[in-house]
Image (spheres, grey):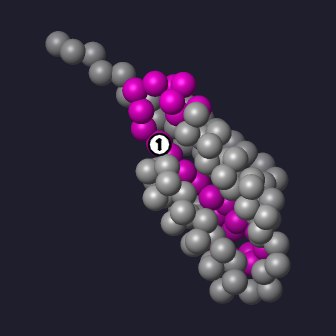
Amino acid sequence: MEVINMVVGACEIECIIFECNSLKEKRHVIKSVIQRLQSRFNISIAEVGENDKWQKSIIGFSAVSNSSKQIDSIASSVINFIDNDERIEIININTDIY
């Protein structure tokens, strides 16, 4: 019987969205970021909290691999990508690897 190592990484990113004056503007920014991250890193991602606040959001994403090192690399890349978007400031990050 072959043993399969499956590692799942989950990350929650709390952030502030600048220059938004309505929920519509916030959703436009968040949707844009989520679509770019999905296509670039092949992760599962969604806005998971603070849906009704127009300058704050919690984005959650997960990835599956056979290596925790790969999960760490993906999480770091996603966080750096978001951090480099001048419309968004990350204020808290919570990462778990299972």
Q: Quadrant of the N terminus?
A: top left
Kind of residue sitting beneath label 1: Ala
Residue 54 appears anywhere in the view: yes
Say left or right for 63 vs 94: left
Q: Is residue 1 above or below residue 50?
A: above
Residue 64 or residue 86, whichever sits in front = 86
Where 76 sits versus 27, above or below?
above
In the image, residue 2 lies in the stretch drawn in magenta: no
Q: Most extreme residue toward the left, as rendered? A: 1
Image-based side of 32 in relation to 84, left or right: left
30 displayed left or right of 68 = right
Element assignment for label 1? strand
- Give the residue displayed 61% in from the left and 48% down from the top: 78
Can you identify the residue that label 1 sits on?
63
User: Is 72 above or below relative to 79?
Assistant: above
Q: Position of residue 12 (x, y in %)?
A: 64, 49
Can residue 14 be seen in the rendering of this structure?
no
Residue at point 66%, 74% (across, down): 29
**Image position, residue 20 (x, y; %):** 78, 80
Residue 53 in the magenta stretch? The answer is: yes
Q: Count the marks.
A: 1
Asked if residue 35 is positioned above or below residue 9 in the image, the reply reads below
Q: Residue 94: x, y in percent?
A: 69, 42
Residue drawn at point x = 58 percent, y = 34 percent: 73
Residue at (74% x, 86% y) in the render:
22
Image location (x, y in percent) of residue 53:
74, 75
Task: State the residue lying farthest toward the top.
Answer: 1
Q: Write down the region rendered in magenta.
A: 49-72
Mark 1 closeness class: few <14, some 14–19, many ≥20 residues within 10 Å: many
The quarter of the displayed image where residue 34 is located = bottom right
Q: Nearer the viewer, residue 53 or 90?
A: 90
